[in-house]
């Protein structure tokens, strides 16, 4: 995320229902650029309420020069009336992320969009 | 019954009716449900629509999903970024529901037009590239 190639990311607090099961779905975008600034793999660390629940890596961009996405889902049970969801860039990879929608499970997939940024 | 079928066979109004019912219901009870049928919304549907709409209907599921978009700006659709540009946000800043956290650095928001662009870069070049799009799977 961004162009600083640091463990920087975004977080948001969402309202939840205590004890409710949720599924957080998101995509990680990847480009394969071994000779340039975009790197070859993309990893995002996902934290819920400060605890890492997933390290999501996408390396499917090999052989292409455009963005290749990989979807992930993280089930979790809300421990309280709010949940803080954090996405952190995981160096040394650069290209990232995502659009996401948590919703009570079971539910079908929801709207997604994407934001990525290479390292500089 | 024959008259009813002719009346509603092609006007496509049954879906919108159901959606209005769902949202009206939602304004009263916004508590999340584990099961799409837990609110028994189907019971609100007039019997004459029963043959067109049941609990497994994809339109019904889609309407329910709309209610469960818990994350604000989950597609990073805001701020709107003009084509060919991007916007960086440094740590401890916020934008449209998101807070930038972690190590000193930044995150970038980019327009959707870059999705199909050739993303190969040149060594030592200094630039940023990205994209965004919206997808819905019902």
Image (cartoon, rainbow, N blue to C red):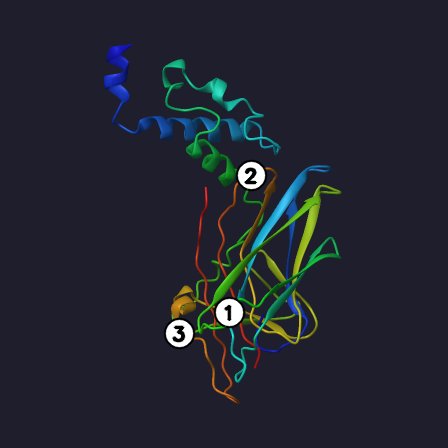
Q: CA distance from mark 1 to mark 2?
A: 29 Å
The secondary element bearing badge 2 is classed as: loop
Q: Residues within 10 Å of mark 2 (few under 14, many from 20)?
A: some
Of all chains, the one bearing label 3 is: B
- Residue at x-position 63% and y-position 67%: A43
Please tell me whether residue A74 is drawn above or below residue B31 in the rendered image: below
**What label does residue B84 carry, if any?**
3
Which residue is situated farthest in the top direction here? B1
Q: CA distance from mark 3 to mark 2?
A: 36 Å
Q: Nearer the viewer, residue B112 or B116?
A: B116
Q: Which quadrant is home to the C terminus of chain A? A: bottom right
Residue A105 horizontal side relative to residue B10, left or right: right
Provide residue B103's location: percent of width, then percent of height: 70, 72
Q: Which quadrant is home to the N terminus of chain A? A: bottom right
Q: Mark 1 or mark 2: which is in front?
A: 1
Of all chains, the one bearing label 2 is: A
The secondary element bearing badge 3 is classed as: loop
Please tell me whether residue B30 is drawn above or below residue A86 in the rendered image: above
Of all chains, the one bearing label 1 is: A
Q: Are marks 3 and 2 on the same chain?
A: no
Q: Mark 1 or mark 3: which is in front?
A: 1
Q: Residues within 10 Å of mark 3 (few under 14, many from 20)?
A: few
**What label does residue A107 carry, if any?**
2
Q: CA distance from mark 1 to mark 3?
A: 22 Å
Q: Nearer the viewer, residue A44 or B20?
A: A44
Q: Are marks 1 and 2 on the same chain?
A: yes
Q: Nearer the viewer, residue A97 or A3?
A: A97
- Residue at x-position 45% and y-position 31%: B60
Residue B101 horizontal side relative to residue B81, left or right: right
Identify residue for label 1.
Answer: A61
Provide residue B112's location: percent of width, then percent of height: 42, 64
């Amino acid at each position: 995320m961004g162009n600083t190639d640091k463990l920087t990311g975004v977080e948001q607090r969402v309202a939840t229902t205590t004890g409710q099961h949720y599924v957080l779905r998101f995509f990680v975008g990847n480009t394969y650029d071994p000779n340039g600034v975009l790197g070859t793999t993309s990893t995002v660390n996902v934290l819920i309420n400060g605890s890492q629940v997933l390290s999501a890596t996408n390396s499917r961009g090999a052989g292409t020069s455009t963005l290749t996405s990989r979807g992930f889902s993280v089930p979790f049970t809300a421990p309280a009336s709010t949940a803080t969801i954090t996405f952190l860039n995981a160096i040394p990879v650069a290209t990232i992320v995502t659009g996401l929608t948590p919703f009570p499970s079971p539910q079908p997939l929801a709207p997604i969009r994407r934001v990525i940024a290479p390292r500089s | 019954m024959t008259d009813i079928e002719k009346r509603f066979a092609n006007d496509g109004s049954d879906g919108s009716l159901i959606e209005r019912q769902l949202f009206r219901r939602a304004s009263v009870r916004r508590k999340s449900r584990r099961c799409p049928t837990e609110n028994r919304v189907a019971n609100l549907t007039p019997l004459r629509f029963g043959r067109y709409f049941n609990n497994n209907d994809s339109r019904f599921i889609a309407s329910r999903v709309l209610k469960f978009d818990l994350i604000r700006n989950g597609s990073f659709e805001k701020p709107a970024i003009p084509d060919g540009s991007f916007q960086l946000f440094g740590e401890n800043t916020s934008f449209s529901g998101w807070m930038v956290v972690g190590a000193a650095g930044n995150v970038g928001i980019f327009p959707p037009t870059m999705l199909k662009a050739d993303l190969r870069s040149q060594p030592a070049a200094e630039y940023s590239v990205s994209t965004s799009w919206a997808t819905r799977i019902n």
